[in-house]
Image (cartoon, coloured by chain):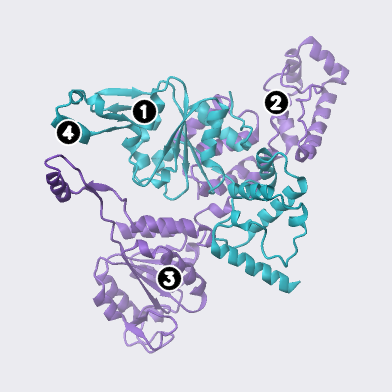
Amino acid sequence: MNFKGTDNYIATEELQMAVNAAKTLQRPLLIKGEPGTGKTMLAEEVAEALNMQLIQWHIKSTTRAHQGLYEYDAVSRLRDSQLGNEKVNDIANYIKKGKLWEAFASKKQVVLLIDEIDKADIEFPNDLLLELDKMEFFVYETGETIKAVQRPIIIITSNNEKELPDAFLRRCFFHYINFPDQATMKAIINVHFPDIQGTLLKDAMDIFFQIREVPGLKKKPSTSELLDWLKLLLADDIPEDILKGRDHTKAIPPLYGALLKNEQDVHMLEKLAFMLRRES
Amino acid sequence: MGVPVSIRELLILLEALELRLAFCSIDDFYLLARLCLVKDEKYFDRYDKAFTAYFKELGDIEDILESLIPEDWLRSEFMKNLSEQEKQKIKSLGGLEKLLETFKERLKEQQARHAGGNKWVGTGGTSPFGHSGYHPEGIRVGGESRNKKAAKVWEKRVYKDLDDSLELGTRNLKVALRKLRKFARSGANEELDLDNTISSTAKNAGWLDIKMIPERHNAIKVLLFFDVGGSMDPFVKICEELFSACKTEFKHLEYFYFHNFIYESVWKDNVRRYTEDLPLEEVLRTYSSDYKVIFIGDASMSPYEISHRGGSVEHMNDQAGYLWMNRLKAIFTKVIWLNPVEEKYWDYTQSIGMVNQLLENEMYPLSLQGLEAGIKSLSH
């Protein structure tokens, strides 16, 4: 079964190709793109579309590679030994399975999301090379080898905070999610708000893309912000023509708080609107 | 400049092709090859260029059809693969020639209607160009041509901005910042705090209580020298913003300004440069040798400004500029010069060569790539 997007996730052809290639060739798929373009959501939607379980591994700056495999809790074993607990004799009691182990051990194929891999230490991806390649690893404490029963579909997201090592990149497929164009954006909105009025949608999108084009914005509004904004507009049940009838005397779009998350950006927009007003 | 790609990736691409992930469609092939071979969006533009160069001739759909339509002797082979029913149908449509003609027309029509989101050739059920019945390697191209948008993508070169050999601008400032941050700090590992562990275990009546502390951060110290005045000002502004944005990440970061080249004094505040200049000797005395020094300037001046006493354009310098540079280099071992002038023009300006020589080739272009290379040299 091929991934074609879901009822609430529009996947471009490029993205479909990327997911299907990763699925067919059983190699990790590295996803990059602007914040808010649905990188993390992709894994959730792939899992749903292919009817698989999703295992999520969210990476933080302190995350170590071996935590994804397993952790040996030496401290509680030491404590248990002081207490004379029976458990202490079996080392397996102190091995905590990580997300990769979980994904490998699953009888059914799963989707494994390694979210924001660039947050971790720079060596992190290097420590996972063999595990992602062969999809197996060795547990030193118990001497067993964990091998993937079904090679999971691995989706890795990155925000480009750190460069990823070449050796790691060579093992992945790479896809860069572009910011959606007007047509794709329309499709995305229709998925989320099927009943939206045509004119409202058009006006809102015009404003949205205009704002995105304002040079020097600290944080450009992204898809998720547009969706939030539309939700607010709809919830407020504002008259249909409020966006259309917007003349330049109105400084910034209504409920702008959903679109602009930065005080300086709001100021800048106000200033621009003021200048426009003076010209006209 | 090419796209870095290894044999391994080529093999993966071949494997993917073997599994028919892209088939008889230049658009799919474009996507698939990019997926397999290109691992950073900054190379997308180069990939697009290479792709265009290679596939330009194939771009025209007429040509693709021509190359896919079998020669006469092949056509009979082609007909053999059809069932009686289909042959009848072809006949009713006016023969193979006519059919191909219609096909081309429909394809054109379809492209025009694409934007409206209408059906494709062959999926409506009336067209003989359905998926079934035909020689599978023959005309599938019609069915696969849905992705016309991508055909233009590699010619539009939408990823141009992401190429890192371009000079620093606001677009890639953020990426440059990340590189600097990486330079400024090392990983925040945790390590065992032995003393604390012992004392808290003791307090705990012998029960082990392990304490961890974060590893100490890397203490990179930097001295920055900016060339101000004239053509350098916009670049200086970018660089100032760049470095001040990550100022907190460095243990020490000091700015100094100079004009064209360094002489006996520099200044810290550009507004009060004539009243509050700072002897370079004092700078050399104040900062220890583990500081790393970064010059930012175009190094484009008259050669005398470097080599001769009194060569400076602004004042009468008692000692030649290169002497000061050598003194500075004697104290600080890690010195680089970032130059906003594109590297290919360096040879045309004598003074650039002179500065580069003074710095033992530690001059880098002020682009992401140059910044990265420079930082690498500083951290070694």
Q: Count residues near mark 3 (Cα–Cα under 10 Å), then give few for <14, some for 14-19, many for 20+.
A: many
Labels 1 & 2 near each other (Cβ < 8 A): no
| Nearer-the-camera pick, A209 or B20 | A209
Q: Where is residue B189 in the image (x, y as percent from the top left)?
A: 28, 48
Which residue position holds label 4?
Answer: A78
Mark 4 vs mark 3: give the one in front: 4
Q: Residue B140 carries which label?
A: 2
In the image, residue B204 sits, relative to residue A52, either above or below, namely below
Q: Are marks 1 and 2 on the same chain?
A: no
Q: Do labels 4 and 2 share a chain?
A: no
Mark 4 vs mark 2: give the one in front: 4
Q: Residue B352 carries which label?
A: 3
Q: Position of residue B101 (x, y in %)?
A: 83, 29
- Type of residue at label 3? Ile
Which residue position holds label 1?
Answer: A101
The chain that appears purple in the image is B
Q: Mark 3, chain letter?
A: B
In the image, residue B20 sits, relative to residue A57, either above or below, namely above
Q: Position of residue B354 (x, y in %)?
A: 38, 72
- Type of residue at label 1? Trp
Mark 1 vs mark 4: give the one in front: 4
Q: Do labels 1 and 4 share a chain?
A: yes
In three-dimensional space, the C-alpha distance between marks 4 and 3, rounded to whole angstroms, equals 65 Å
In three-dimensional space, the C-alpha distance between marks 1 and 2, rounded to whole angstroms, equals 42 Å
Q: At numbered mark 1, what does the secondary structure look like: helix, strand or loop? A: helix
Q: Mark 4, chain letter?
A: A
**Is residue B257 left or right of B38 when viewed as pictured?**
left
In three-dimensional space, the C-alpha distance between marks 1 and 3, rounded to whole angstroms, equals 57 Å
Residue at image position (46%, 49%) is A160
Where the N terminus of chain A falls, by quadrant? top right
Q: Count residues near mark 4 (Cα–Cα under 10 Å), then give few for <14, some for 14-19, many for 20+.
A: some
Q: Count residues near mark 1 (Cα–Cα under 10 Å), then give few for <14, some for 14-19, many for 20+.
A: many
